[in-house]
Image (cartoon, rainbow, N blue to C red):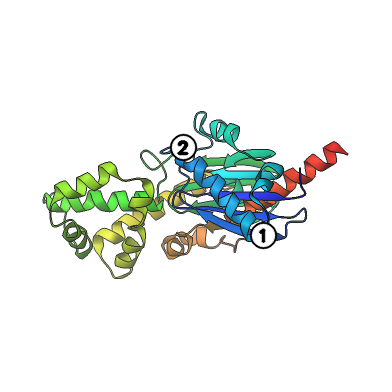
Amino acid sequence: MTGLAIGIDGGGSSCRAAVADRVGNILGRGNAGPANILSDLESSLINIVESAREALRAAGLSADTLSKVSAVVGVAGANVGDYGVRIERALPFADGHVVTDALIALQGALGDSDGVIGAFGTGSVYNARRDGKLHGIGGWGFIIGDQASGARLGRDLMEKSLLAYDGVRPSSPLTARILAEYGDDPERLVEFAHVSKPKDFARYAPLVFDYAAQGDEIAAGIVKAAAAAIGENLDALLWPECPAICLLGGLAKAYEPWLSERHKALLAQPKGDVLRGAVDLAVKRLNAAKRGAA
């Protein structure tokens, strides 16, 4: 095995990788398609491996280096059934380990310190470290979980738009815009929902926040409900002496103004992002293996 480690953030919209040396210096980065292992295990594996190959290419390393590195892959759904195990068994690395996206998010934001994190991208997940002990919640997928995720915001917008079309709930400029996008034909909107993946719903999240900021009542209602869900999840993990809350992911900044004041008071800037967390864990694993072999 070489003295190289690869950290991979397998997100629902894209997969990011970085190759680093033994002290954590990043030598190259790579990107590939989504890695949603619950909805498409085969494509997720392809994209995980391709992002690692791209990182090696960017570092000026040959593709066959892939089989000689230590890697940590963080993905949503690694805690569900045997999905994480199946990905791990198929990885082409000399030493490949699959963990939850919550763990790499925690490591990236807090390093080895205590605190609570919430990560919000296509999916959502939470984790805490208290006195060195880890406890994660969420990350169950947007069909029955992932509240406040980009995918859930988009799904909720589709639902509200159909209710507005049927006259069950009020309409708004945002629901009118969504219906117009589908030719004011609810069947087209339903067809989209049935064939789409989480990342397809998540592309509507920025639109929800934009309209909420403009005072659109439906958009604001969706964001307020999501922010309330964030508060509930944070409360399930917080303890009186908790030093910090870090929010991560593409939607983190957008949510900050909508949080309760008591949660805002604990917000801290993350030390690094989710990919940095994956890299740090991969480097730790690489160095532990070296010590074990010594």
Image quadrant in which the N terminus is located: top right
Q: Which residue is mark 1?
A: 59
Specify the amino acid type for callout 2: Glu
- Which residue reaches farthest top? 82
Residues at marks 1 and 2, CA–CA distance in whole angstroms: 26 Å
Specify the amino acid type for callout 1: Ala
Percent across and percent down for residue 260 are 45, 59
Q: Earlier in the sequence, mark 1 or mark 2?
A: 2
- Secondary structure under the numbered disc 1 in the rendered image: loop
Measuring 61% from the left and 55% from the top, which residue is drawn there?
55
Q: Say few, some or many: other residues with alpha carbon within 10 Å of mark 1 (under 14 / 14 to 19 / 20 or more).
A: some
Measuring 15% from the left and 49% from the top, which residue is drawn there?
186
Percent across and percent down for residue 77 are 49, 38
Q: Which residue is mark 2?
A: 42
Residue 294 visible in the current orientation: yes
Image quadrant in which the C terminus is located: top right
- Residues 68 and 193: in front is 68
- Secondary structure under the numbered disc 2 in the rendered image: helix
Measuring 66% from the left and 54% from the top, which residue is drawn there?
19
Left or right of 79, for residue 96:
right
Left or right of 116, for residue 218:
left
Left or right of 22, for residue 196:
left
